[in-house]
Image (cartoon, coloured by chain):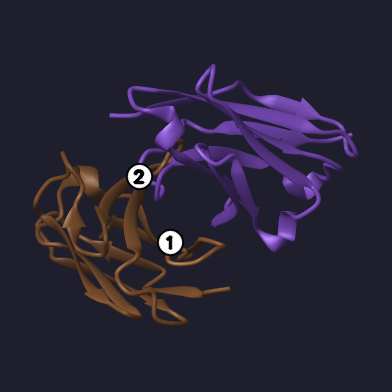
Amino acid sequence: DIQMTQSPSSLSASVGDRVTITCRASQDIRNDLGWYQQKPGKAPKRLIYGAASLQSGVPSRFSGSGSGTEFTLTISSLQPEDFATYFCLQFNNYPFTFGPGTKVDVK
Amino acid sequence: QVQLVQSGAEVKKPGSSVKVSCKASGGTFSSYAISWVRQAPGQGFEWMGRIIVNLGLASYAQKFQGRVTINADKSTTTAYMELSSLRSEDTAIYYCASGHMDVWGEGTTVSVSS
């Protein structure tokens, strides 16, 4: 199975901060990666697909980059509604596997 | 845009089975793939399996092999996940998701307790 690691596991930030989250795959997954946001009690929402493509309707302050084994999600200017947990998912190979998540909370 | 609506919460006894449904609308169901994942309380996500609806071909995570069955009914545009031999560790929120996990259902809470 492809192992996904994610860092940091949590971070504290302020509105307006630039936030960067990293995901690493245990083997090459090309660009078969998505980034998701989950708020308490809600289903996850996809932000980025194909490692770098912005999901329709998602604000442009979210961006993704990377390919192969290292990927990054960046929030250029954190907004109040962005405090949530973020995780990555690889769909290059079965079983699909998830990063453990990064919780972004208020500094 | 596809939408997925799941069946309601379930409370089950250890050793029993649960069947969760996921009704799709807003797209061409036969062209979908539907995955099932779960999230135990305070834990991360586990992918359980996926069905390619047009082919009726299901693939399962090794962890759940033999205990999970995923199928789909094209006539009702509904996918199903059945998990048998339930134990307390199966208490979780179960989600369906389409394609490469682009759209998710709202989740179904399954509680297993004696």
Question: Can I make out residue B74 in this image?
Answer: yes
Nearer to me, B101 or B30: B30
- Which type of secondary structure does the marked residue at label 1 adopt? loop
**Picture residue at 54% right of the left edge, 41% below the top:** B55
Nearer to me, A75 or A47: A47
Tag 1 subunit: A
- Position in image of residue A71 (x %, y %): 28, 74
- Position in image of residue A52 (x %, y %): 19, 63
**Picture residue at 83% right of the left edge, 42% below the top:** B86
Q: Which chain is brown?
A: A
Q: Quadrant of the C terminus of chain A?
A: bottom left
Vertical relation: B52 (above or below) B20: below
Label total for image:
2
Vertical relation: B33 (above or below) B13: below
Disc 1 marks which residue?
A: A91
Q: Which chain is purple?
A: B
Disc 2 marks which residue?
A: B102
Nearer to me, B50 or A90: B50
Tag 2 subunit: B
